[in-house]
Image: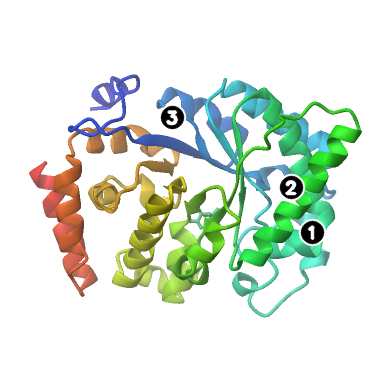
Amino acid sequence: ARNKLASLRDVPSATRDGVDIDLHANIELPIELSAALENGATGIGLLRSEFMFMNKDYLPDEDEQYAELADIVKRMDGKPVTIRTLDIGGEKLAVALQADMGTGPNPALGLRGVRLSLRKPELLEAQFGAILRASLHGKVRVLIPMVVSVHEMTRARHIYEAVAKRLRKQGHAIPDDLPPLGAMIEIPAAAIAVDTLARECDFFAIGTNDLTQYTLAIDRTDDQVAGLFDPLHPSVLRLIRDVIKLSNERGIPVSVCGEMAGDPRYIPLFIGFGLRNLSMSPVNLLLVKQRLRRLDTRNSKHQADRVMEQWDQARIAVMLDDFNDLA
Ligand code: PEP
Ligand code: MG
């Protein structure tokens, strides 16, 4: 079965009725890059930049981050790389930032993601500087985590443009058209009012891990409630469906990059919602490609509509299993 999967590496990722689907990789550590390429990723849909901050007792400066990012962008050889700014906080920790974050009563609801970056703008300035310089070596997009309101994106964009100006003044070569700046949609507030974010975002990436956590009020790291962590809850599915729908209507590129995207069982649902770009752990790329090559988009749409009429998530899981057996 492994060989058969491997033979899928170079075949197009398209549905049976010929609709192209982008399959990108989520990367946490540079070492995963070769697995992404070996499994046929056509880009990196989520580069988690936290690796540059972990296991270090100092903050890496712009030059150090540039060196790491430029290497990745070069190795992707023109394939798109979506670089996410720092998402420290919650379950993700960095020694050098511990003092800034303090010990709030609930880290998942505390100073994390873009909140920390805007509280300490020098973090964002160094990251944007490194990313903009790296973007000269390929095709880059910039992604902001944990966004809840358009003001955060306005402030981030302001800093982004100021950094670009500073770099040009310093004589660094950066592209005339700055790389697209987008937001993670991973908090219910952002998903519900995604139209308000659309004015400041060039693209969206739906993070189903945090979206599930915050919609269901279930800590993604708490073993006691792990069994209740179910992205098939109708509320989670409605948020995902509606974000995809609005993005498609407005012509804003949208992807799903949470763990759900790498589970072949969910693929008919996503395709039925109108999604055309998924990003996942490299190990899941070929399984997902195999799944989607057997799908028909019109049939998937019909199946997704039926799923969304359900009120019981256990029933939804059974339906998805049925759809997948029939294919
Ligand atoms: C998510 O929240 O779904 C996501 C992709 O980001 P992370 O898992 O890094 O929080
Ligand atoms: Mg997240």
- Kindly identify which numbered label has been placed on residue 53: 2
Circle on res. 43: none
- Residue 142 or 104: which is nearer the viewer? 142
Q: Are marks 2 and 1 in contact (CB under 8 Å)?
A: yes
Most distant residue in the bottom direction: 105
| Lower position in the chain sequence, tag 2 or tag 1 | 2
Three-letter residue code for mark 2: Phe
Q: Is ligand 1 within 8 Å of the beta carbon of the residue shown at mark 1?
A: no
Residue under the image location 43 percent in, 52 percent down: 250
Residue in the image at 68% along x and 52% along y:
86
C-beta proximity under 8 Å, tags 3 and 1 = no
Q: Which residue is mark 3?
A: 41
- Look at the picture and state if 64 lies above or below 95: above
Q: Nearer the viewer, residue 65 or 197?
A: 197
Amino acid type, label 3: Ala
Quick one: SS at disc 1?
helix
Q: Secondary structure at mark 2?
A: loop
Residue occupying image coordinates x 62% and y 25%: 138
Asked whether residue 192 appears in the rendered view, the answer is: yes
Instruction: Name the residue at 48% across, 63% down.
Output: 195
Q: Position of residue 325 (x, y in %)?
A: 11, 46
CA separation, marks 2 and 1? 9 Å
From this view, report whether residue 71 is shown above or below residue 310.
above
CB-based contact (under 8 Å), mark 2 and mark 3: no
Which residue in the structure is indicated by mark 1?
97
Q: Is residue 189 left or right of residue 177?
A: left
> What is the quadrant of residue 8 in the picture?
top left
Query: Which quadrant is home to the N terminus?
Result: top left
